[in-house]
Amino acid sequence: MSVEEIGPMTPVSSPVSPRREAPDNERIREEERIREEERIRQEEEEARRREEEMRREHQIDEFA
């Protein structure tokens, strides 16, 4: 086999190895996704609390 058939070789000690870099990037993206989901969950929970509080206030106004 000639070099042309195999293609260019990347040295094993390449300073930027995609295989070494990928897990970190993947982990960071996963952490960001988890933080974003938690933020959205907290916002939805706060909106439900405010809505419930408004309902209670409205009911009190009706019976006052």
Image (tube, rainbow, N blue to C red):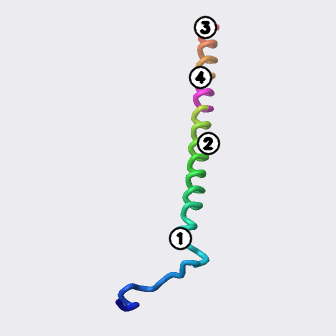
Q: Which residue is mark 3?
A: 63
What is the three-letter code of the residue carrying label 1?
Pro
Picture quarter with the C terminus: top right
What is the three-letter code of the residue carrying label 3?
Phe
**Of the image marks 4 and 2, the number of the one nearer the N terminus:** 2
Residue 33 image point, x, y percent: 56, 50
Disc 1 versus disc 2: distance between alpha carbons? 31 Å
Foreground: disc 1 or disc 2: 1
Label 1: state its secondary structure. helix
Q: Which residue is mark 2?
A: 39
- Label 2: few (<14), some (14–19) or many (≥20) C-alpha neighbours in 10 Å: few
**Residue bounds of the magenta highlight:** 46-52
Disc 4 versus disc 2: distance between alpha carbons? 20 Å
Mark carried by residue 52: 4
Foreground: disc 3 or disc 4: 4
Residue 21 image point, x, y percent: 57, 67
Question: Which of the 4 image quadrants contains residue 37?
Answer: top right
Disc 3 versus disc 4: distance between alpha carbons? 17 Å
